[in-house]
Amino acid sequence: MRVSILQENLHKGLSIVGRAIQSRPTLPILSNVMIATDDARLQLSATNLELGITHWIGAKVEHPGSITVPARTLQELVSTLPPERVDMELDPRTLTLHLRCGAKSANIKGMDAAEYPLMPEFDPTRAIPIKAGVFREMIEQVAFATAKEDNRPILTGVQMRLDDDQLTLAAADGYRLAVRTTTLEFSAGDRAPEPLIVPARTLSELARIISDEDDEVLIGLPEGRGQIMFSLKNVVVVSQLIEGKFPDYEAIIPRGFQTQVLAYTDELLAACRSSEVFAKDSANTARVLVEPSGMAGVPGRVTVAGRSQEKGDAEAPLDASIDGQAVEISFNIRYLIDVLGVIREDQVVLETSGPTSPGVVRPAGRDDFVHVIMPMSTSR
């Protein structure tokens, strides 16, 4: 193998595929990145057997070939090279990759590419397209609500459901629920699978990889492998699915409310952050006091309060349009901050039916995103 590539492109490619490599892999070769020529492109691949990422980069290929080398070593080395052309040549006898960039040179010992796990081929003919920017936003609005502990593996994933031209992502951790839907440009038809559960880590990594240059994401399912694939302009991500039955989240979403608050997103987010300074010493418990004005044309008031037995307390009031009854309800303030941070609209709606009822947060004027937060006991 003899190939030339720009240092910045190689560095970016290694950063992308390196997300699939674990710090302590089960097999030594899984700490390597596979480098292979593909016509006039260089293919970089990495996997931990649960998540795999392949990235293609334009290159000048003089002789085809492939090799696997330690990913961290190569990435650290490339980051120290000047922004010039990198020439790479493989010695197949010693499995050593020679690199030269400007006056710098290096030799990296590798392992035979034939020993590297095979990535499945992506079949674009049966793939389901979605706009890349929309899919990235959907992921960002649900993935954070998944469970972080593995005691209930099903909740560490995001349910992906396709109904004709409707795509729904749902995530829950037992204390909160996030559901985001969108309408696809084309109906999935007979390509629509049963609801799938995709690891949240896979989707979070995909959201980081999606760039403004990507017009769409193609979603594909290799037949009979229990995997899902996502294809971008120059990247393919493959992931194992999580087996099991996702909770019936539709039953969790309240269908009515006694109190509705309409507030500016940035003002409510700022109030929550002020209260968090003290609330984090009390299991993140913060009080949200909703007070209607009772006078036409006069805004109501929402006060977010956090208290620490040792450090003190803080109250942050803000004006809001309030429909319904006064209420005081306690939430995990971190959960409110998380959801307010992914709402792009200027205004947000908070609905509840009392101090022991769930709170529903959604962007004002939109019904494609809903977030449910369970209240916390005021005795805490």
Image (cartoon, grey):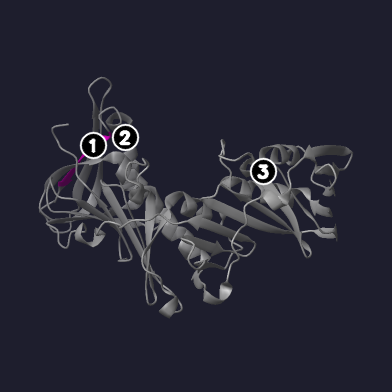
Q: CA distance from mark 2 to mark 1?
A: 7 Å
**Which SS class for mark 2?**
helix
Bin the neighbour count of mark 3 within 10 Å (Cα to Cα): few under 14, some 14-19, many 20 and up. many
Identify which residue is drawn at 37% across, 68% down. 194
- Whether residues under marks 1 and 3 lie with C-beta atoms below 8 angstroms apart, the answer is no
Q: CA distance from mark 3 to mark 2?
A: 42 Å
Rendered position, 147 above or below 305:
below
Instruction: Tell us which disc is closer to us: 3 or 2.
Output: 3
User: Relative to residue 177, is residue 289 depicted above or below?
Assistant: above
Disc 1 designates what residue? Answer: 286
- Amino acid type at image mark 1: Ala
Please report the residue visible at 63 percent of the width from the left and 39 percent of the height from the top. Answer: 28
Residue that appears at 78% across and 65% down: 39
Q: Nearer the viewer, residue 112 or 290?
A: 112
Residue for badge 3: 32
Give the image location of residue 234, x and y in percent: 65, 62
Image quadrant where one finds the N terminus: bottom right
Residue bounds of the magenta highlight: 284-290
Give, as a three-letter code, the residue at label 2: Glu
Residue 276's disc is 2
Element at label 3: strand
State yes or no: discs 2 and 1 in contact (Cβ < 8 Å): yes
Rendered view: 368 above or below 75: below
Which SS class for mark 1?
strand
Specify which label sits upstream in the sequence, 2 or 1.
Answer: 2
